[in-house]
Image: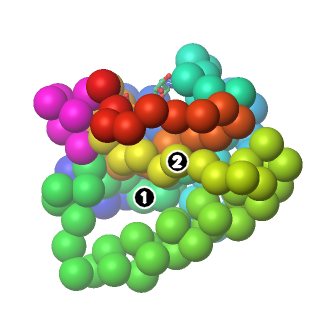
Amino acid sequence: MLNGLLSNCIFCRIGNGDVRSDKVYEDEEFFAFKDINPQSPVHVVVIPKKHISDLSVASDGDKVMLGCIQLLIAKIAKQFSELNNGFRVVSNCGYDAGQTVFHMHYHLLGGRIFAWPPG
Ligand code: 5GP
Ligand code: ZN
């Protein structure tokens, strides 16, 4: 199922408030919260509330959502002074990329210097 909420999806449950999280932002469409296992001083996970497993299954109907979520990430970044000098936005897509939660999300990372290429 690509639309709506999945009861066995941890990010659907965080997005609808069934599972507690350290919330950073919420509106009707999106939810952002601190990662439980932060990889940098600032590590926020930003999700659409609507379930979509990963970017590879996004369609033309998701164009507005995908634009809005990136603008939202930039807006959230402004809330953290640690990100004034830059931040990284990552969306792991599929097993080879290291995706572990199959509800599309973006990681907003910062507060330290990152290496490139990533591991
Ligand atoms: P992925 O590995 O799929 O790119 O990212 C999933 C992220 O979700 C990981 O960084 C992981 O630490 C985080 N995560 C998984 N379960 C939970 C949870 O229940 N609460 C929070 N706050 N983060 C979670
Ligand atoms: Zn979900």
- Which mark, by number, is residue 76? none
Q: Position of residue 75 (x, y in %)?
A: 70, 66
**Colour treatment of the image:** rainbow
Does the closest atom of ligand 1 sit within 8 Å of the Cβ of label 2?
no
Residue under label 2, please give it. 88
**Residue type beneath disc 1:** Lys
Question: What segment is highlighted magenta in the picture?
Answer: 93-98
Asked which secondary structure carries label 1, the reply is loop
Asked which secondary structure carries label 2, the reply is strand
**Residue type beneath disc 2:** Arg
Instruction: Estimate how packed mark 1 is, as few (under 14), some (14 to 19) or many (20 or more) residues with alpha carbons within 10 Å.
Output: many
x 45%, y 33%: residue: 115
Q: Position of residue 77 (x, y in %)?
A: 70, 56
* Residue 40 shows in this picture: yes
- Side of 37 where 5 appears, left or right: left
Q: Nearer the viewer, residue 103 or 56?
A: 56
Residue under label 1, please give it. 50
Number of numbered tags placed on the structure image: 2
Mark 1 to mark 2 CA distance (whole Å): 24 Å
* Residue 18 shows in this picture: no
Disc 1 or 2, which lies upstream in sequence? 1
x 60%, y 34%: residue: 113
Q: Residue 97 lies in magenta, yes or no?
A: yes
Residue 46, relative to residue 36: is it above or below?
Answer: below
Tags 1 and 2 touching, CB below 8 Å: no
Q: Position of residue 51 (x, y in %)?
A: 36, 52
- Side of 84 where 95 appears, left or right: left
Residue 82, by quadrant, is top right
